[in-house]
Amino acid sequence: MNHVADQANEPVMRIRCECGRWRKRIVIAGRLMPAFEACSCEGYEQAQASRDAKVKRQIERQKAENRQKRISRMLLKFGCNDKYRNVTLKDLRVVDLFNQEFFHAATEFAHGERQGLWAYGSVGTGKSIIERAALNGRIRAENGENAFYLSASRMIDLLRPSNGDAQARLKAHALEEYIFGPCKCLMIDDADKPNITPAYVALLFKIIEHYHMAKKKILITSNCNHSELRDKLKVANLSDGPAIVRRLMEICGKPFELTGAVWYQGKLKRRS
Ligand SMILES: [Zn+2]
């Protein structure tokens, strides 16, 4: 046996307490434990408690980071990876009067003071970017874990995959579990853009009904107003269609009509 190496690997048998006394290594049944005897001095308990708290904080921080990474990976896979993903309400300048009223509601939503937001209007009036900024406000407030963005077209593609292979079914299952589970705030963009099929209306109804019952948050945008949307959905499903619009208005209030323009000051992130 190499004597020098043994000395270098000599285990630490005692450490000094803050008070100066030695604390001996704990040995149980001849085995060295990774701990030292407590000291009876006054400062010891407190110092030990603060050391424990520090370790606990480190573990908690690590856990939160890992959770955040896991969620980010999932969000990037399924949605929330659009060009608006970093937009905040502070980046937006709203010039039109109607839009200003909506912007105010969006600010309330970002502060957690509203359960829903619904904006309608033609392309380019800023409904998506304002709602997305409000959603981002919630994402920041909730530490990223509870809010999700999907365009309606992507939502139906992901949750009701038409090709139906194993990978697509697995994705659909995971996303469905998230939307009906931990997700507390869902944005459905361009709700009247996909083909209004019975399958789409049934899916939308299931989601809106769940968010209504569970008192979760909904953000929605559409090109048409509520009575036009009701008529469109009714064609595909006579009872669920009108129920969707009714529930949406209970959650979001009367939809805001956007007419003007929104100025965005900042760079949009490319999809990666
Ligand atoms: Zn001591």
Image (tube, rainbow, N blue to C red):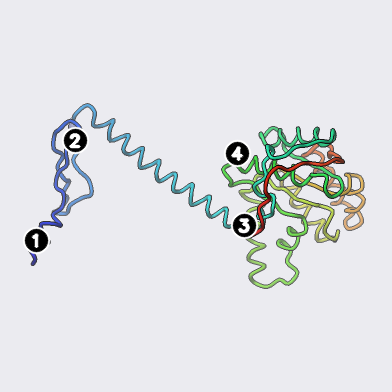
Question: Quick one: 72 or 181, which is closer to the camera?
Answer: 72
Name which residue lies at 71% across and 61% down: 159
Marks 3/1: CA distance?
Answer: 54 Å
Left or right: 89 in relation to 39: right
Earlier sequence position, callout 4 versus callout 3: 3
What amino acid is labelled 4 in the image? Answer: Ala
Earlier sequence position, callout 4 versus callout 1: 1
Q: Secondary structure at mark 4?
A: helix
- Which quadrant is the C terminus positioned in? bottom right
Marks 3/2: CA distance?
Answer: 49 Å
- In the picture, the disc for residue 17 is 2
Which one is in front in this view, the residue at disc 4 or the one at disc 1? 1
Name which residue lies at 66% across and 56% down: 270
In the picture as drawn, the residue positioned furthest to the top comes out as: 42
Name which residue lies at 84% across and 47% down: 243
Marks 4/1: CA distance?
Answer: 57 Å
Q: Which residue bears the numbered disc 4?
A: 141
Task: Mark 2 and ligand 1: say if the CB distance to the nearest ligand atom is below 8 Å.
Answer: yes
Question: Quick one: 92 or 233, which is closer to the camera?
Answer: 92
Name which residue lies at 89% across and 45% down: 225
Q: Which residue bears the numbered disc 1?
A: 4
Residue 150, horizontal then vertical, whole percent:
71, 54
Marks 4/3: CA distance?
Answer: 19 Å
Question: Quick one: 124 or 56, which is closer to the camera?
Answer: 124
Q: Secondary structure at mark 2?
A: loop
